[in-house]
Image (cartoon, rainbow, N blue to C red):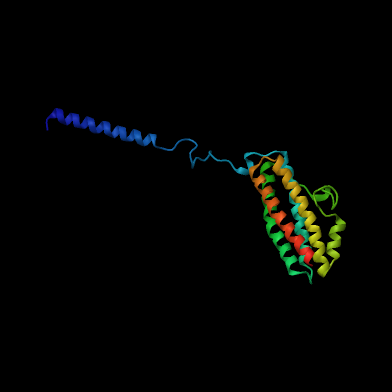
């Protein structure tokens, strides 16, 4: 190989190497691609408004009362097992939802509230039981307790559905909207189940 040919070959190889390195650089990750630490934001903090805050602040004590009602029923003897199964299912479903909503309020810098200002059964549309209603459930027993629990929980669920539909109409946060839709769907089905069972007792 002549010196001139050798020089030309070295030049070609150097150029090819440079082009390969350039192609690798172009194929590298771009800003905002998957894996970029700043590319994603928590869905719970992405967007929220006053309706989202109100939904969580009011639904937490609403759920807490449903769990209290279920706990009261589950301490009693002589209650139809189909009713106790519903009470157990309500507890299992609503405690994780309470935890989720409390987490949102913490992230949003909003305070939780209690149910003291939410009204009793028959006042407004939230379905909350009054102190007298709760006492009546505690004092009931056996089959009467099961029937009273179903009557009260149907009304309680109806109030929750009204609150959830308000969130669907006025809220902004995607996680809150998803939970609201889940409450509408699941509690509508539970109301139908409880009405059927109440008629059969």
For image coordinates 50% across by 40% down, the residue present is 36
Q: Position of residue 153 (x, y in %)?
A: 78, 58
For image coordinates 72% across by 45% down, the residue present is 165
Count every numbered label the image shows and give the total. 0
Q: Is residue 135 above or below residue 56?
A: below
Residue sticking out furthest to the bottom = 78
Pick whichever, 156 or 98, lies toward us.
Answer: 156
Q: Position of residue 116 (x, y in %)?
A: 83, 50
Q: Which of the 4 image quarters holds residue 195?
A: bottom right
Left or right: where does residue 195 sit relative to residue 186? Answer: right
Is residue 110 something that shows in the picture?
no
Is residue 27 something that shows in the picture?
yes
- Locate the N terminus by quadrant: top left
Q: Position of residue 15 (x, y in %)?
A: 27, 31
Residue sticking out furthest to the left = 2
Residue sticking out furthest to the right = 132
Q: Position of residue 49 (x, y in %)?
A: 70, 38
For image coordinates 19% across by 29% down, the residue present is 8
Left or right: where does residue 178 sit relative to residue 17? Answer: right
Pick whichever, 8 or 192, lies toward us.
Answer: 192
- Locate the C terminus by quadrant: bottom right
């Amino acid at each position: 190989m002549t010196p001139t040919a050798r020089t030309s070959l070295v030049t070609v190889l150097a150029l090819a190497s440079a082009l390969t390195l350039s192609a690798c650089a172009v194929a590298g990750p771009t800003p905002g691609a998957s894996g970029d630490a700043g590319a994603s934001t928590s869905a719970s903090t992405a967007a929220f408004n006053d309706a989202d805050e109100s939904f969580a602040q009011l639904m937490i004590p609403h759920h807490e009362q449903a769990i209290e009602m279920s706990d009261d029923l589950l301490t009693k003897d002589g209650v139809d097992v189909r009713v106790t199964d519903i009470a157990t299912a309500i507890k299992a479903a609503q405690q994780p939802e309470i935890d989720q909503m409390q987490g949102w309020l913490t992230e949003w810098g909003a305070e939780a509230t209690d149910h003291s200002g939410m009204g009793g059964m028959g006042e407004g549309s939230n379905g909350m039981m009054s102190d007298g209603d709760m006492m009546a459930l505690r004092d009931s027993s056996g089959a009467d307790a099961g029937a009273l629990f179903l009557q009260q929980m149907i009304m309680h669920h109806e109030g929750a559905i009204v609150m959830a539909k308000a969130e669907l109409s006025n809220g902004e946060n995607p996680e809150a909207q998803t939970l609201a839709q889940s409450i509408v769907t699941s509690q509508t089905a539970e109301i139908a189940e409880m009405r059927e069972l109440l008629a059969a007792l």
